[in-house]
Image (cartoon, coloured by chain):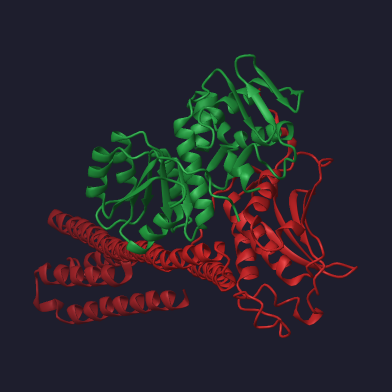
Chain colours: A red, B green
Amino acid sequence: MAELRSSAAMSVVLWYGLLILATVVMHMARETQESQAHVVLTYLLIVLGGSVSGGRPLGFTLAAAATLLVSYYFQYPFDEFSLTKPIDAVVLSAFFATSGTTTYLLVRAQEEAAQARARTEEIEQLSDQASHAAALREAARFKDILLASVSHDLRTPLTSIKALAQDAADLGDANSEIIVAQAERLSKMVAHLLDMSRLNAGEFPVTIELNTAEDLVGAAVLEMKGTSGAERIRVEIDYSAPALVGMFDFVESLRILTNLLDNALLYSPANTPVVLSATRVGDWLQLSIADRGPGVPDADVQQIFEPFYRHASTSSTVPGTGLGLAIARSLAEAQGGQLTFSKRPEGGSTFALRLRAVGESILSFED
Amino acid sequence: MVMHPTRTDATVLVIDDEPEIRHVVHSALRSTVARVLDAADGRSALAAVKAQTPDLIVLDLGLPDQSGLDLCRAIRAHSLAPIVVLTARHIESDKVALLNAGADDYVTKPFSTSEFAARVAAQIRRARTARPGTSGTVEADGMSVNFTSRRAQRAGTPVRLTPIEWAIMRALTADPGRVYTHQQLFDAVWAREFGDARQYLRVHITNLRRKVERDPTHPRVIITEPGVGYRFGTPLAQESA
C-alpha cells in the first residue's frame, strides 16, 4: 500500500516537473514564435504521459494546469489571463476538451486491458483447476478399478482353496480344517488391507440413513455365526431407553462391530462372555463390546487405534493385521461417530461405538 | 457341518470364466443337484439358458466379455430360473443393482461350500413350490402367517399386526427366501413415489420383529441382508442356526 502511494507521488513530481520544464523552455523561445500549436501539442503529450502513469486525477489536473499555462504565457497579451481574440478561446477550450477526453479514454483503455488480463489469468487458473479435478477423478476411477481387480484376483484363488479344503475337512481331514481357517484369516486380512487403502486415499463414501440399533446388533450376531467362540456373545438391548434409532451407515457400522467382536473373542479366555450391548446415552446410540480379556496396558492406551499397533506381548501366532481398530475408528469418524476404549474395573476392555441418535418425534409416522 | 440338503433332479448352469471356480461349484453341488452345466462366457451362457432351460443359474461377476448386470438382465429376459450371483466385491450398491436386475440371491467370495449348496437348494425349492401369494399360510421358526384369515400366530398365541406390518409381511412372503431390496419392499408396501418412508421401513421392521421373532436380536423370521434389504426366513436360516 505504502509502495503504491510513493509511486503515485513519484509520478506527480515527475510529470509536474516536466510540465514546468517544458513551460520554461517554451517561454524562453516565446518571442520568436507566434504559433500556439507546438505549445499545445507539447502540453498534450505531457498530459497523456501523466494520465498513463498517474491515472485520471493526475491527467485531469495536468490538463487544467496546462490550459491555464497556455492562456497565461502563450496567448497574447502575454503574462496575464485575458482573451483578446476569439480564436484563443477556441484553442483553449479545444485543448482542454481534447486533453480531458484523451485522458479519460486512455485511462479507460488501460483499465479494460487490466481487467482483460485479470480475466485471462482467472480463466487460466480455472482451466488448470478443471484439468486437475479431471485428473483426480481419473485417478479415483483408476483406484476403484484397481481395488476391484485386486479383490477379485485375491478372493478367487482363496475361494478355491477354502472350498476344496472344506470338502476334505468334511471328510474328516484335520489338516484341511486348518487350511480352511487360514484361508478365512487371509481373506479377512485382504479385506482389512483394501479398507485401509480406501481410507488412506481419503475417499470413503458413507450412506447415512435412518437405522435401528436392534437391526444392527442382529446382523452382527448373524455375521459372527460360524466364527469360533461366537456362542460366547451375549446381547443386551436396553428396551427401557427411547427407541434405539439413529442416523448411520449400516454396513460400515456392521463392519466396526464385527471387527470389535473378532478382537474380543480372540483376546479373551474361552470360558468368558463377550457382551454386546445397545443403549442410548444423551444424543448418542451407544453400542458397547465388553470382554474379560487382559485389557490394554495404560502406556499403550493412546496407541491402540494407530495402524499396525500390536501389543508387545501379543504372540505372533494370534492372527491379526494390527489394522482392525484403526479401520474401526476411521469408519466411526467417517459417519460422524466415535469409537473409544475404556478399562473395565473388574478386568477386561470395553470398546464403545457412538452413533448419532434420532429423537422419538421422527418416529411418529402414520400406520 | 451342515448336512447336504436332499438331492434333487435339478439342472444347474454355472457361468464362470475361471475353471477352478467351476470346479468348486461342481464339487459343492455334487450331492445337491443332478446335473451341472458350464459356460465360460456370456455368449455361450445365453445359448445354454435357451437350449438347456436350467433350473438354476450360478453367475460369477467379472466375465471377460460382458458385464454381470447386463448378462443378468439378458438371462431374465429368457428364463425365470433363480439366479445366484457369486461376487468378490463387497460393495452393497452392486448387490442391490443385481437384485434389481433380476438376481435372487448372492454369495460373497470366499464362500463356504456347505452354505453355497444350502442356498442353491433353497432357491431351487423356492422356485418349485407354489407361491403362497395372497392365500395359504407361510411359516418360519414357529411363526405362522395366514393371509386369507389374516391371522398371525406363534405357537398358538395370536400376534397382532398393524396394517403396514401386514403389508410388509405380504411383500416379504410373496417369495419366501428371496432377498428383497429396501426399494422393492418400499414400492410394494407404500405404492407411492414420494417421501422417504424407505427409511421408516427399517423402524417398522424393528417393531415387527419384536412381535414375530422369538428373540429380536437373533432374527430367524425376518433376516437382514446388510446394506441390501431383507428376506423372509428360509429353511436354510433355520437349518444352519
Residue toward you, B191 or B160:
B160
Q: Quadrant of the N terminus of chain B?
A: bottom right
Residue A97, how many percent across, how many down? 21, 56
Q: How many marks?
A: 0
Instruction: List the single residue furthest toward the top.
Output: B149
Residue at 53 percent across and 32 percent down: it is: B185
Residue A328, how many percent across, how many down? 63, 64
Residue toward you, B58 or B180:
B58
Residue at 10 percent across and 68 percent down: it is: A37
Residue A205 seen from this side = no
Instruction: List the single residue furthest toward the right.
Output: A346
| Quadrant of the rendered image containing residue A91 | bottom left
Residue A52 seen from this side = yes
Residue toward you, A15 or A256:
A256
Residue B115, how many percent across, how many down? 53, 52
| Quadrant of the rendered image containing residue B24 | bottom left
- Whether residue A265 sits left or right of residue B240 in the image: it is right
Residue at 35 percent across and 65 percent down: it is: A142
